[in-house]
Amino acid sequence: MIDITNPDTYRDGIPHAVFQHMRDNEPVALREYEGRPYWAVTRYADLVTVTRDPKTFSSARGMTNLPDLTEEQMNARRSIIDTDAPEHVRLRKLGIPAFTGRKVRSYEETTREITHTLLSDAVAAERVDIVSAISAPLPIRVIVGILGVPEEDTDFMVQLSDELIDSSDLPDDAYGNTTPLELLPFSSPASHALFEYGAKLGGERRRDPQDDLVTTLVHTEVEGDRLSEYDYKNMFHVLVFAGNETTRTAISNGIRAFMDNPDQLELLHRQPELLDQAVEEIIRFATPVLHMRRTATCDTELAGIQIKEDDKVVIWYASANFDEREFENPLAFDITRPIKPPQVSFGAKGPHHCLGAPLARMEIRVLLEEIVKLRIRFETDGPTIRTRSNFVNGIASLPGRVFQL
């Protein structure tokens, strides 16, 4: 039996045949991770059921990590992702002002300037690593610019974000860290560095407000409530990671999909009115986050399977986004695919629907608009190297040719 929690299972991308077998034969399957049982939820409809029922399937109890954590670890690591109502509602209310439609539209001009420059430079170089030339710098430059991080610190933010996923080369005390690694998100000293940087920037913006996201976060007040220092630092950490890694992964996989399916890019050039559908198809096909964990708060039933209180329930976006019951010919990359049913990469419209989803969609849409405007095409120029992870569907290197027609 193939272990879907083993990072090596994803060395060539999502193991679609494995997930299809599970959907067809055992859609809610009992599996083990680190010797402890969990339920693997692989069908679209069942994932949506779990996502939209936080009272039964908690993000706070046990948190959203695959590993089982101690109470001390959970208290130290908890962010907005790992909360339930009413705390989750409170944190979303305090974070939403940074991601309103008006706010996201105000970020578009800067995003377009960054995108245009990156694509033009890639065309001039012709042979590039797509990841380092386009998909990595675009979202991190956008998010750090929005946050108010000085431009000279952008590379440092990229470095820390990368080290959250793989910190194997870092000593425990990197960046002056003295916190036991098990008490840090991703068990990485890079988390300590992000917390410290965020705290410093937040302190500066409390004293000297600017027109940026950090200022919004530290000064927003809803019904007399504000983010605590702890809440703010965790929010900053989540935004740097999620605002960078997931969009970067979507862009990398999206460009790889266009390389493998050049007819789809030609179709987009001919019919730019397909932009919105293309954005959603890229997000579905990429599925940047492979899974999330929930914990049952009571005895319940899912797809005819009895689940007991405190059972670990893991929802696999990597499977649900390719469920034949919802998507016709799901393994095909098809920018004409109807937007409904929607892809579930951002949380299936449940209470944990990604706060930054409008920003991610805007960045991908602007990238596609500039690709069309500049008449850009892509070709592979070497082997794709994937990130070794069971959580992020990442691409570490994507050699390619970038040229204009």
Image (tube, rainbow, N blue to C red):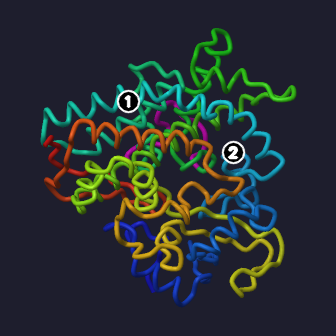
State the residue at coordinates (63%, 12%).
209
Q: Which mark is residue 80?
A: 2
Q: How many marks?
A: 2
Q: Nearer the viewer, residue 225 or 7?
A: 225
The spot of residue 69 in percent (x, y) is 67, 59
Quadrant of the rendered image containing residue 131: top left
> Which amino acid lies under the numbered mark 1 shown in the image of this protein?
Arg
Give the side of residue 38 with respect to residue 193, left or right: right
State the residue at coordinates (64%, 38%).
234
Quadrant of the rendered image containing residue 311: bottom right
Look at the magenta stretch and give its main secondary structure.
Answer: loop
> Which amino acid lies under the numbered mark 2 shown in the image of this protein?
Ile
In the image as oriented, which residue stretches furthest toward the bottom?
A: 25
Note whether 215 is above or below 16 in the view shown. above
Give the side of residue 297 with respect to residue 193, left or right: right
The spot of residue 320 in percent (x, y) is 53, 71
Please provide the residue range marked out in magenta: 169-181
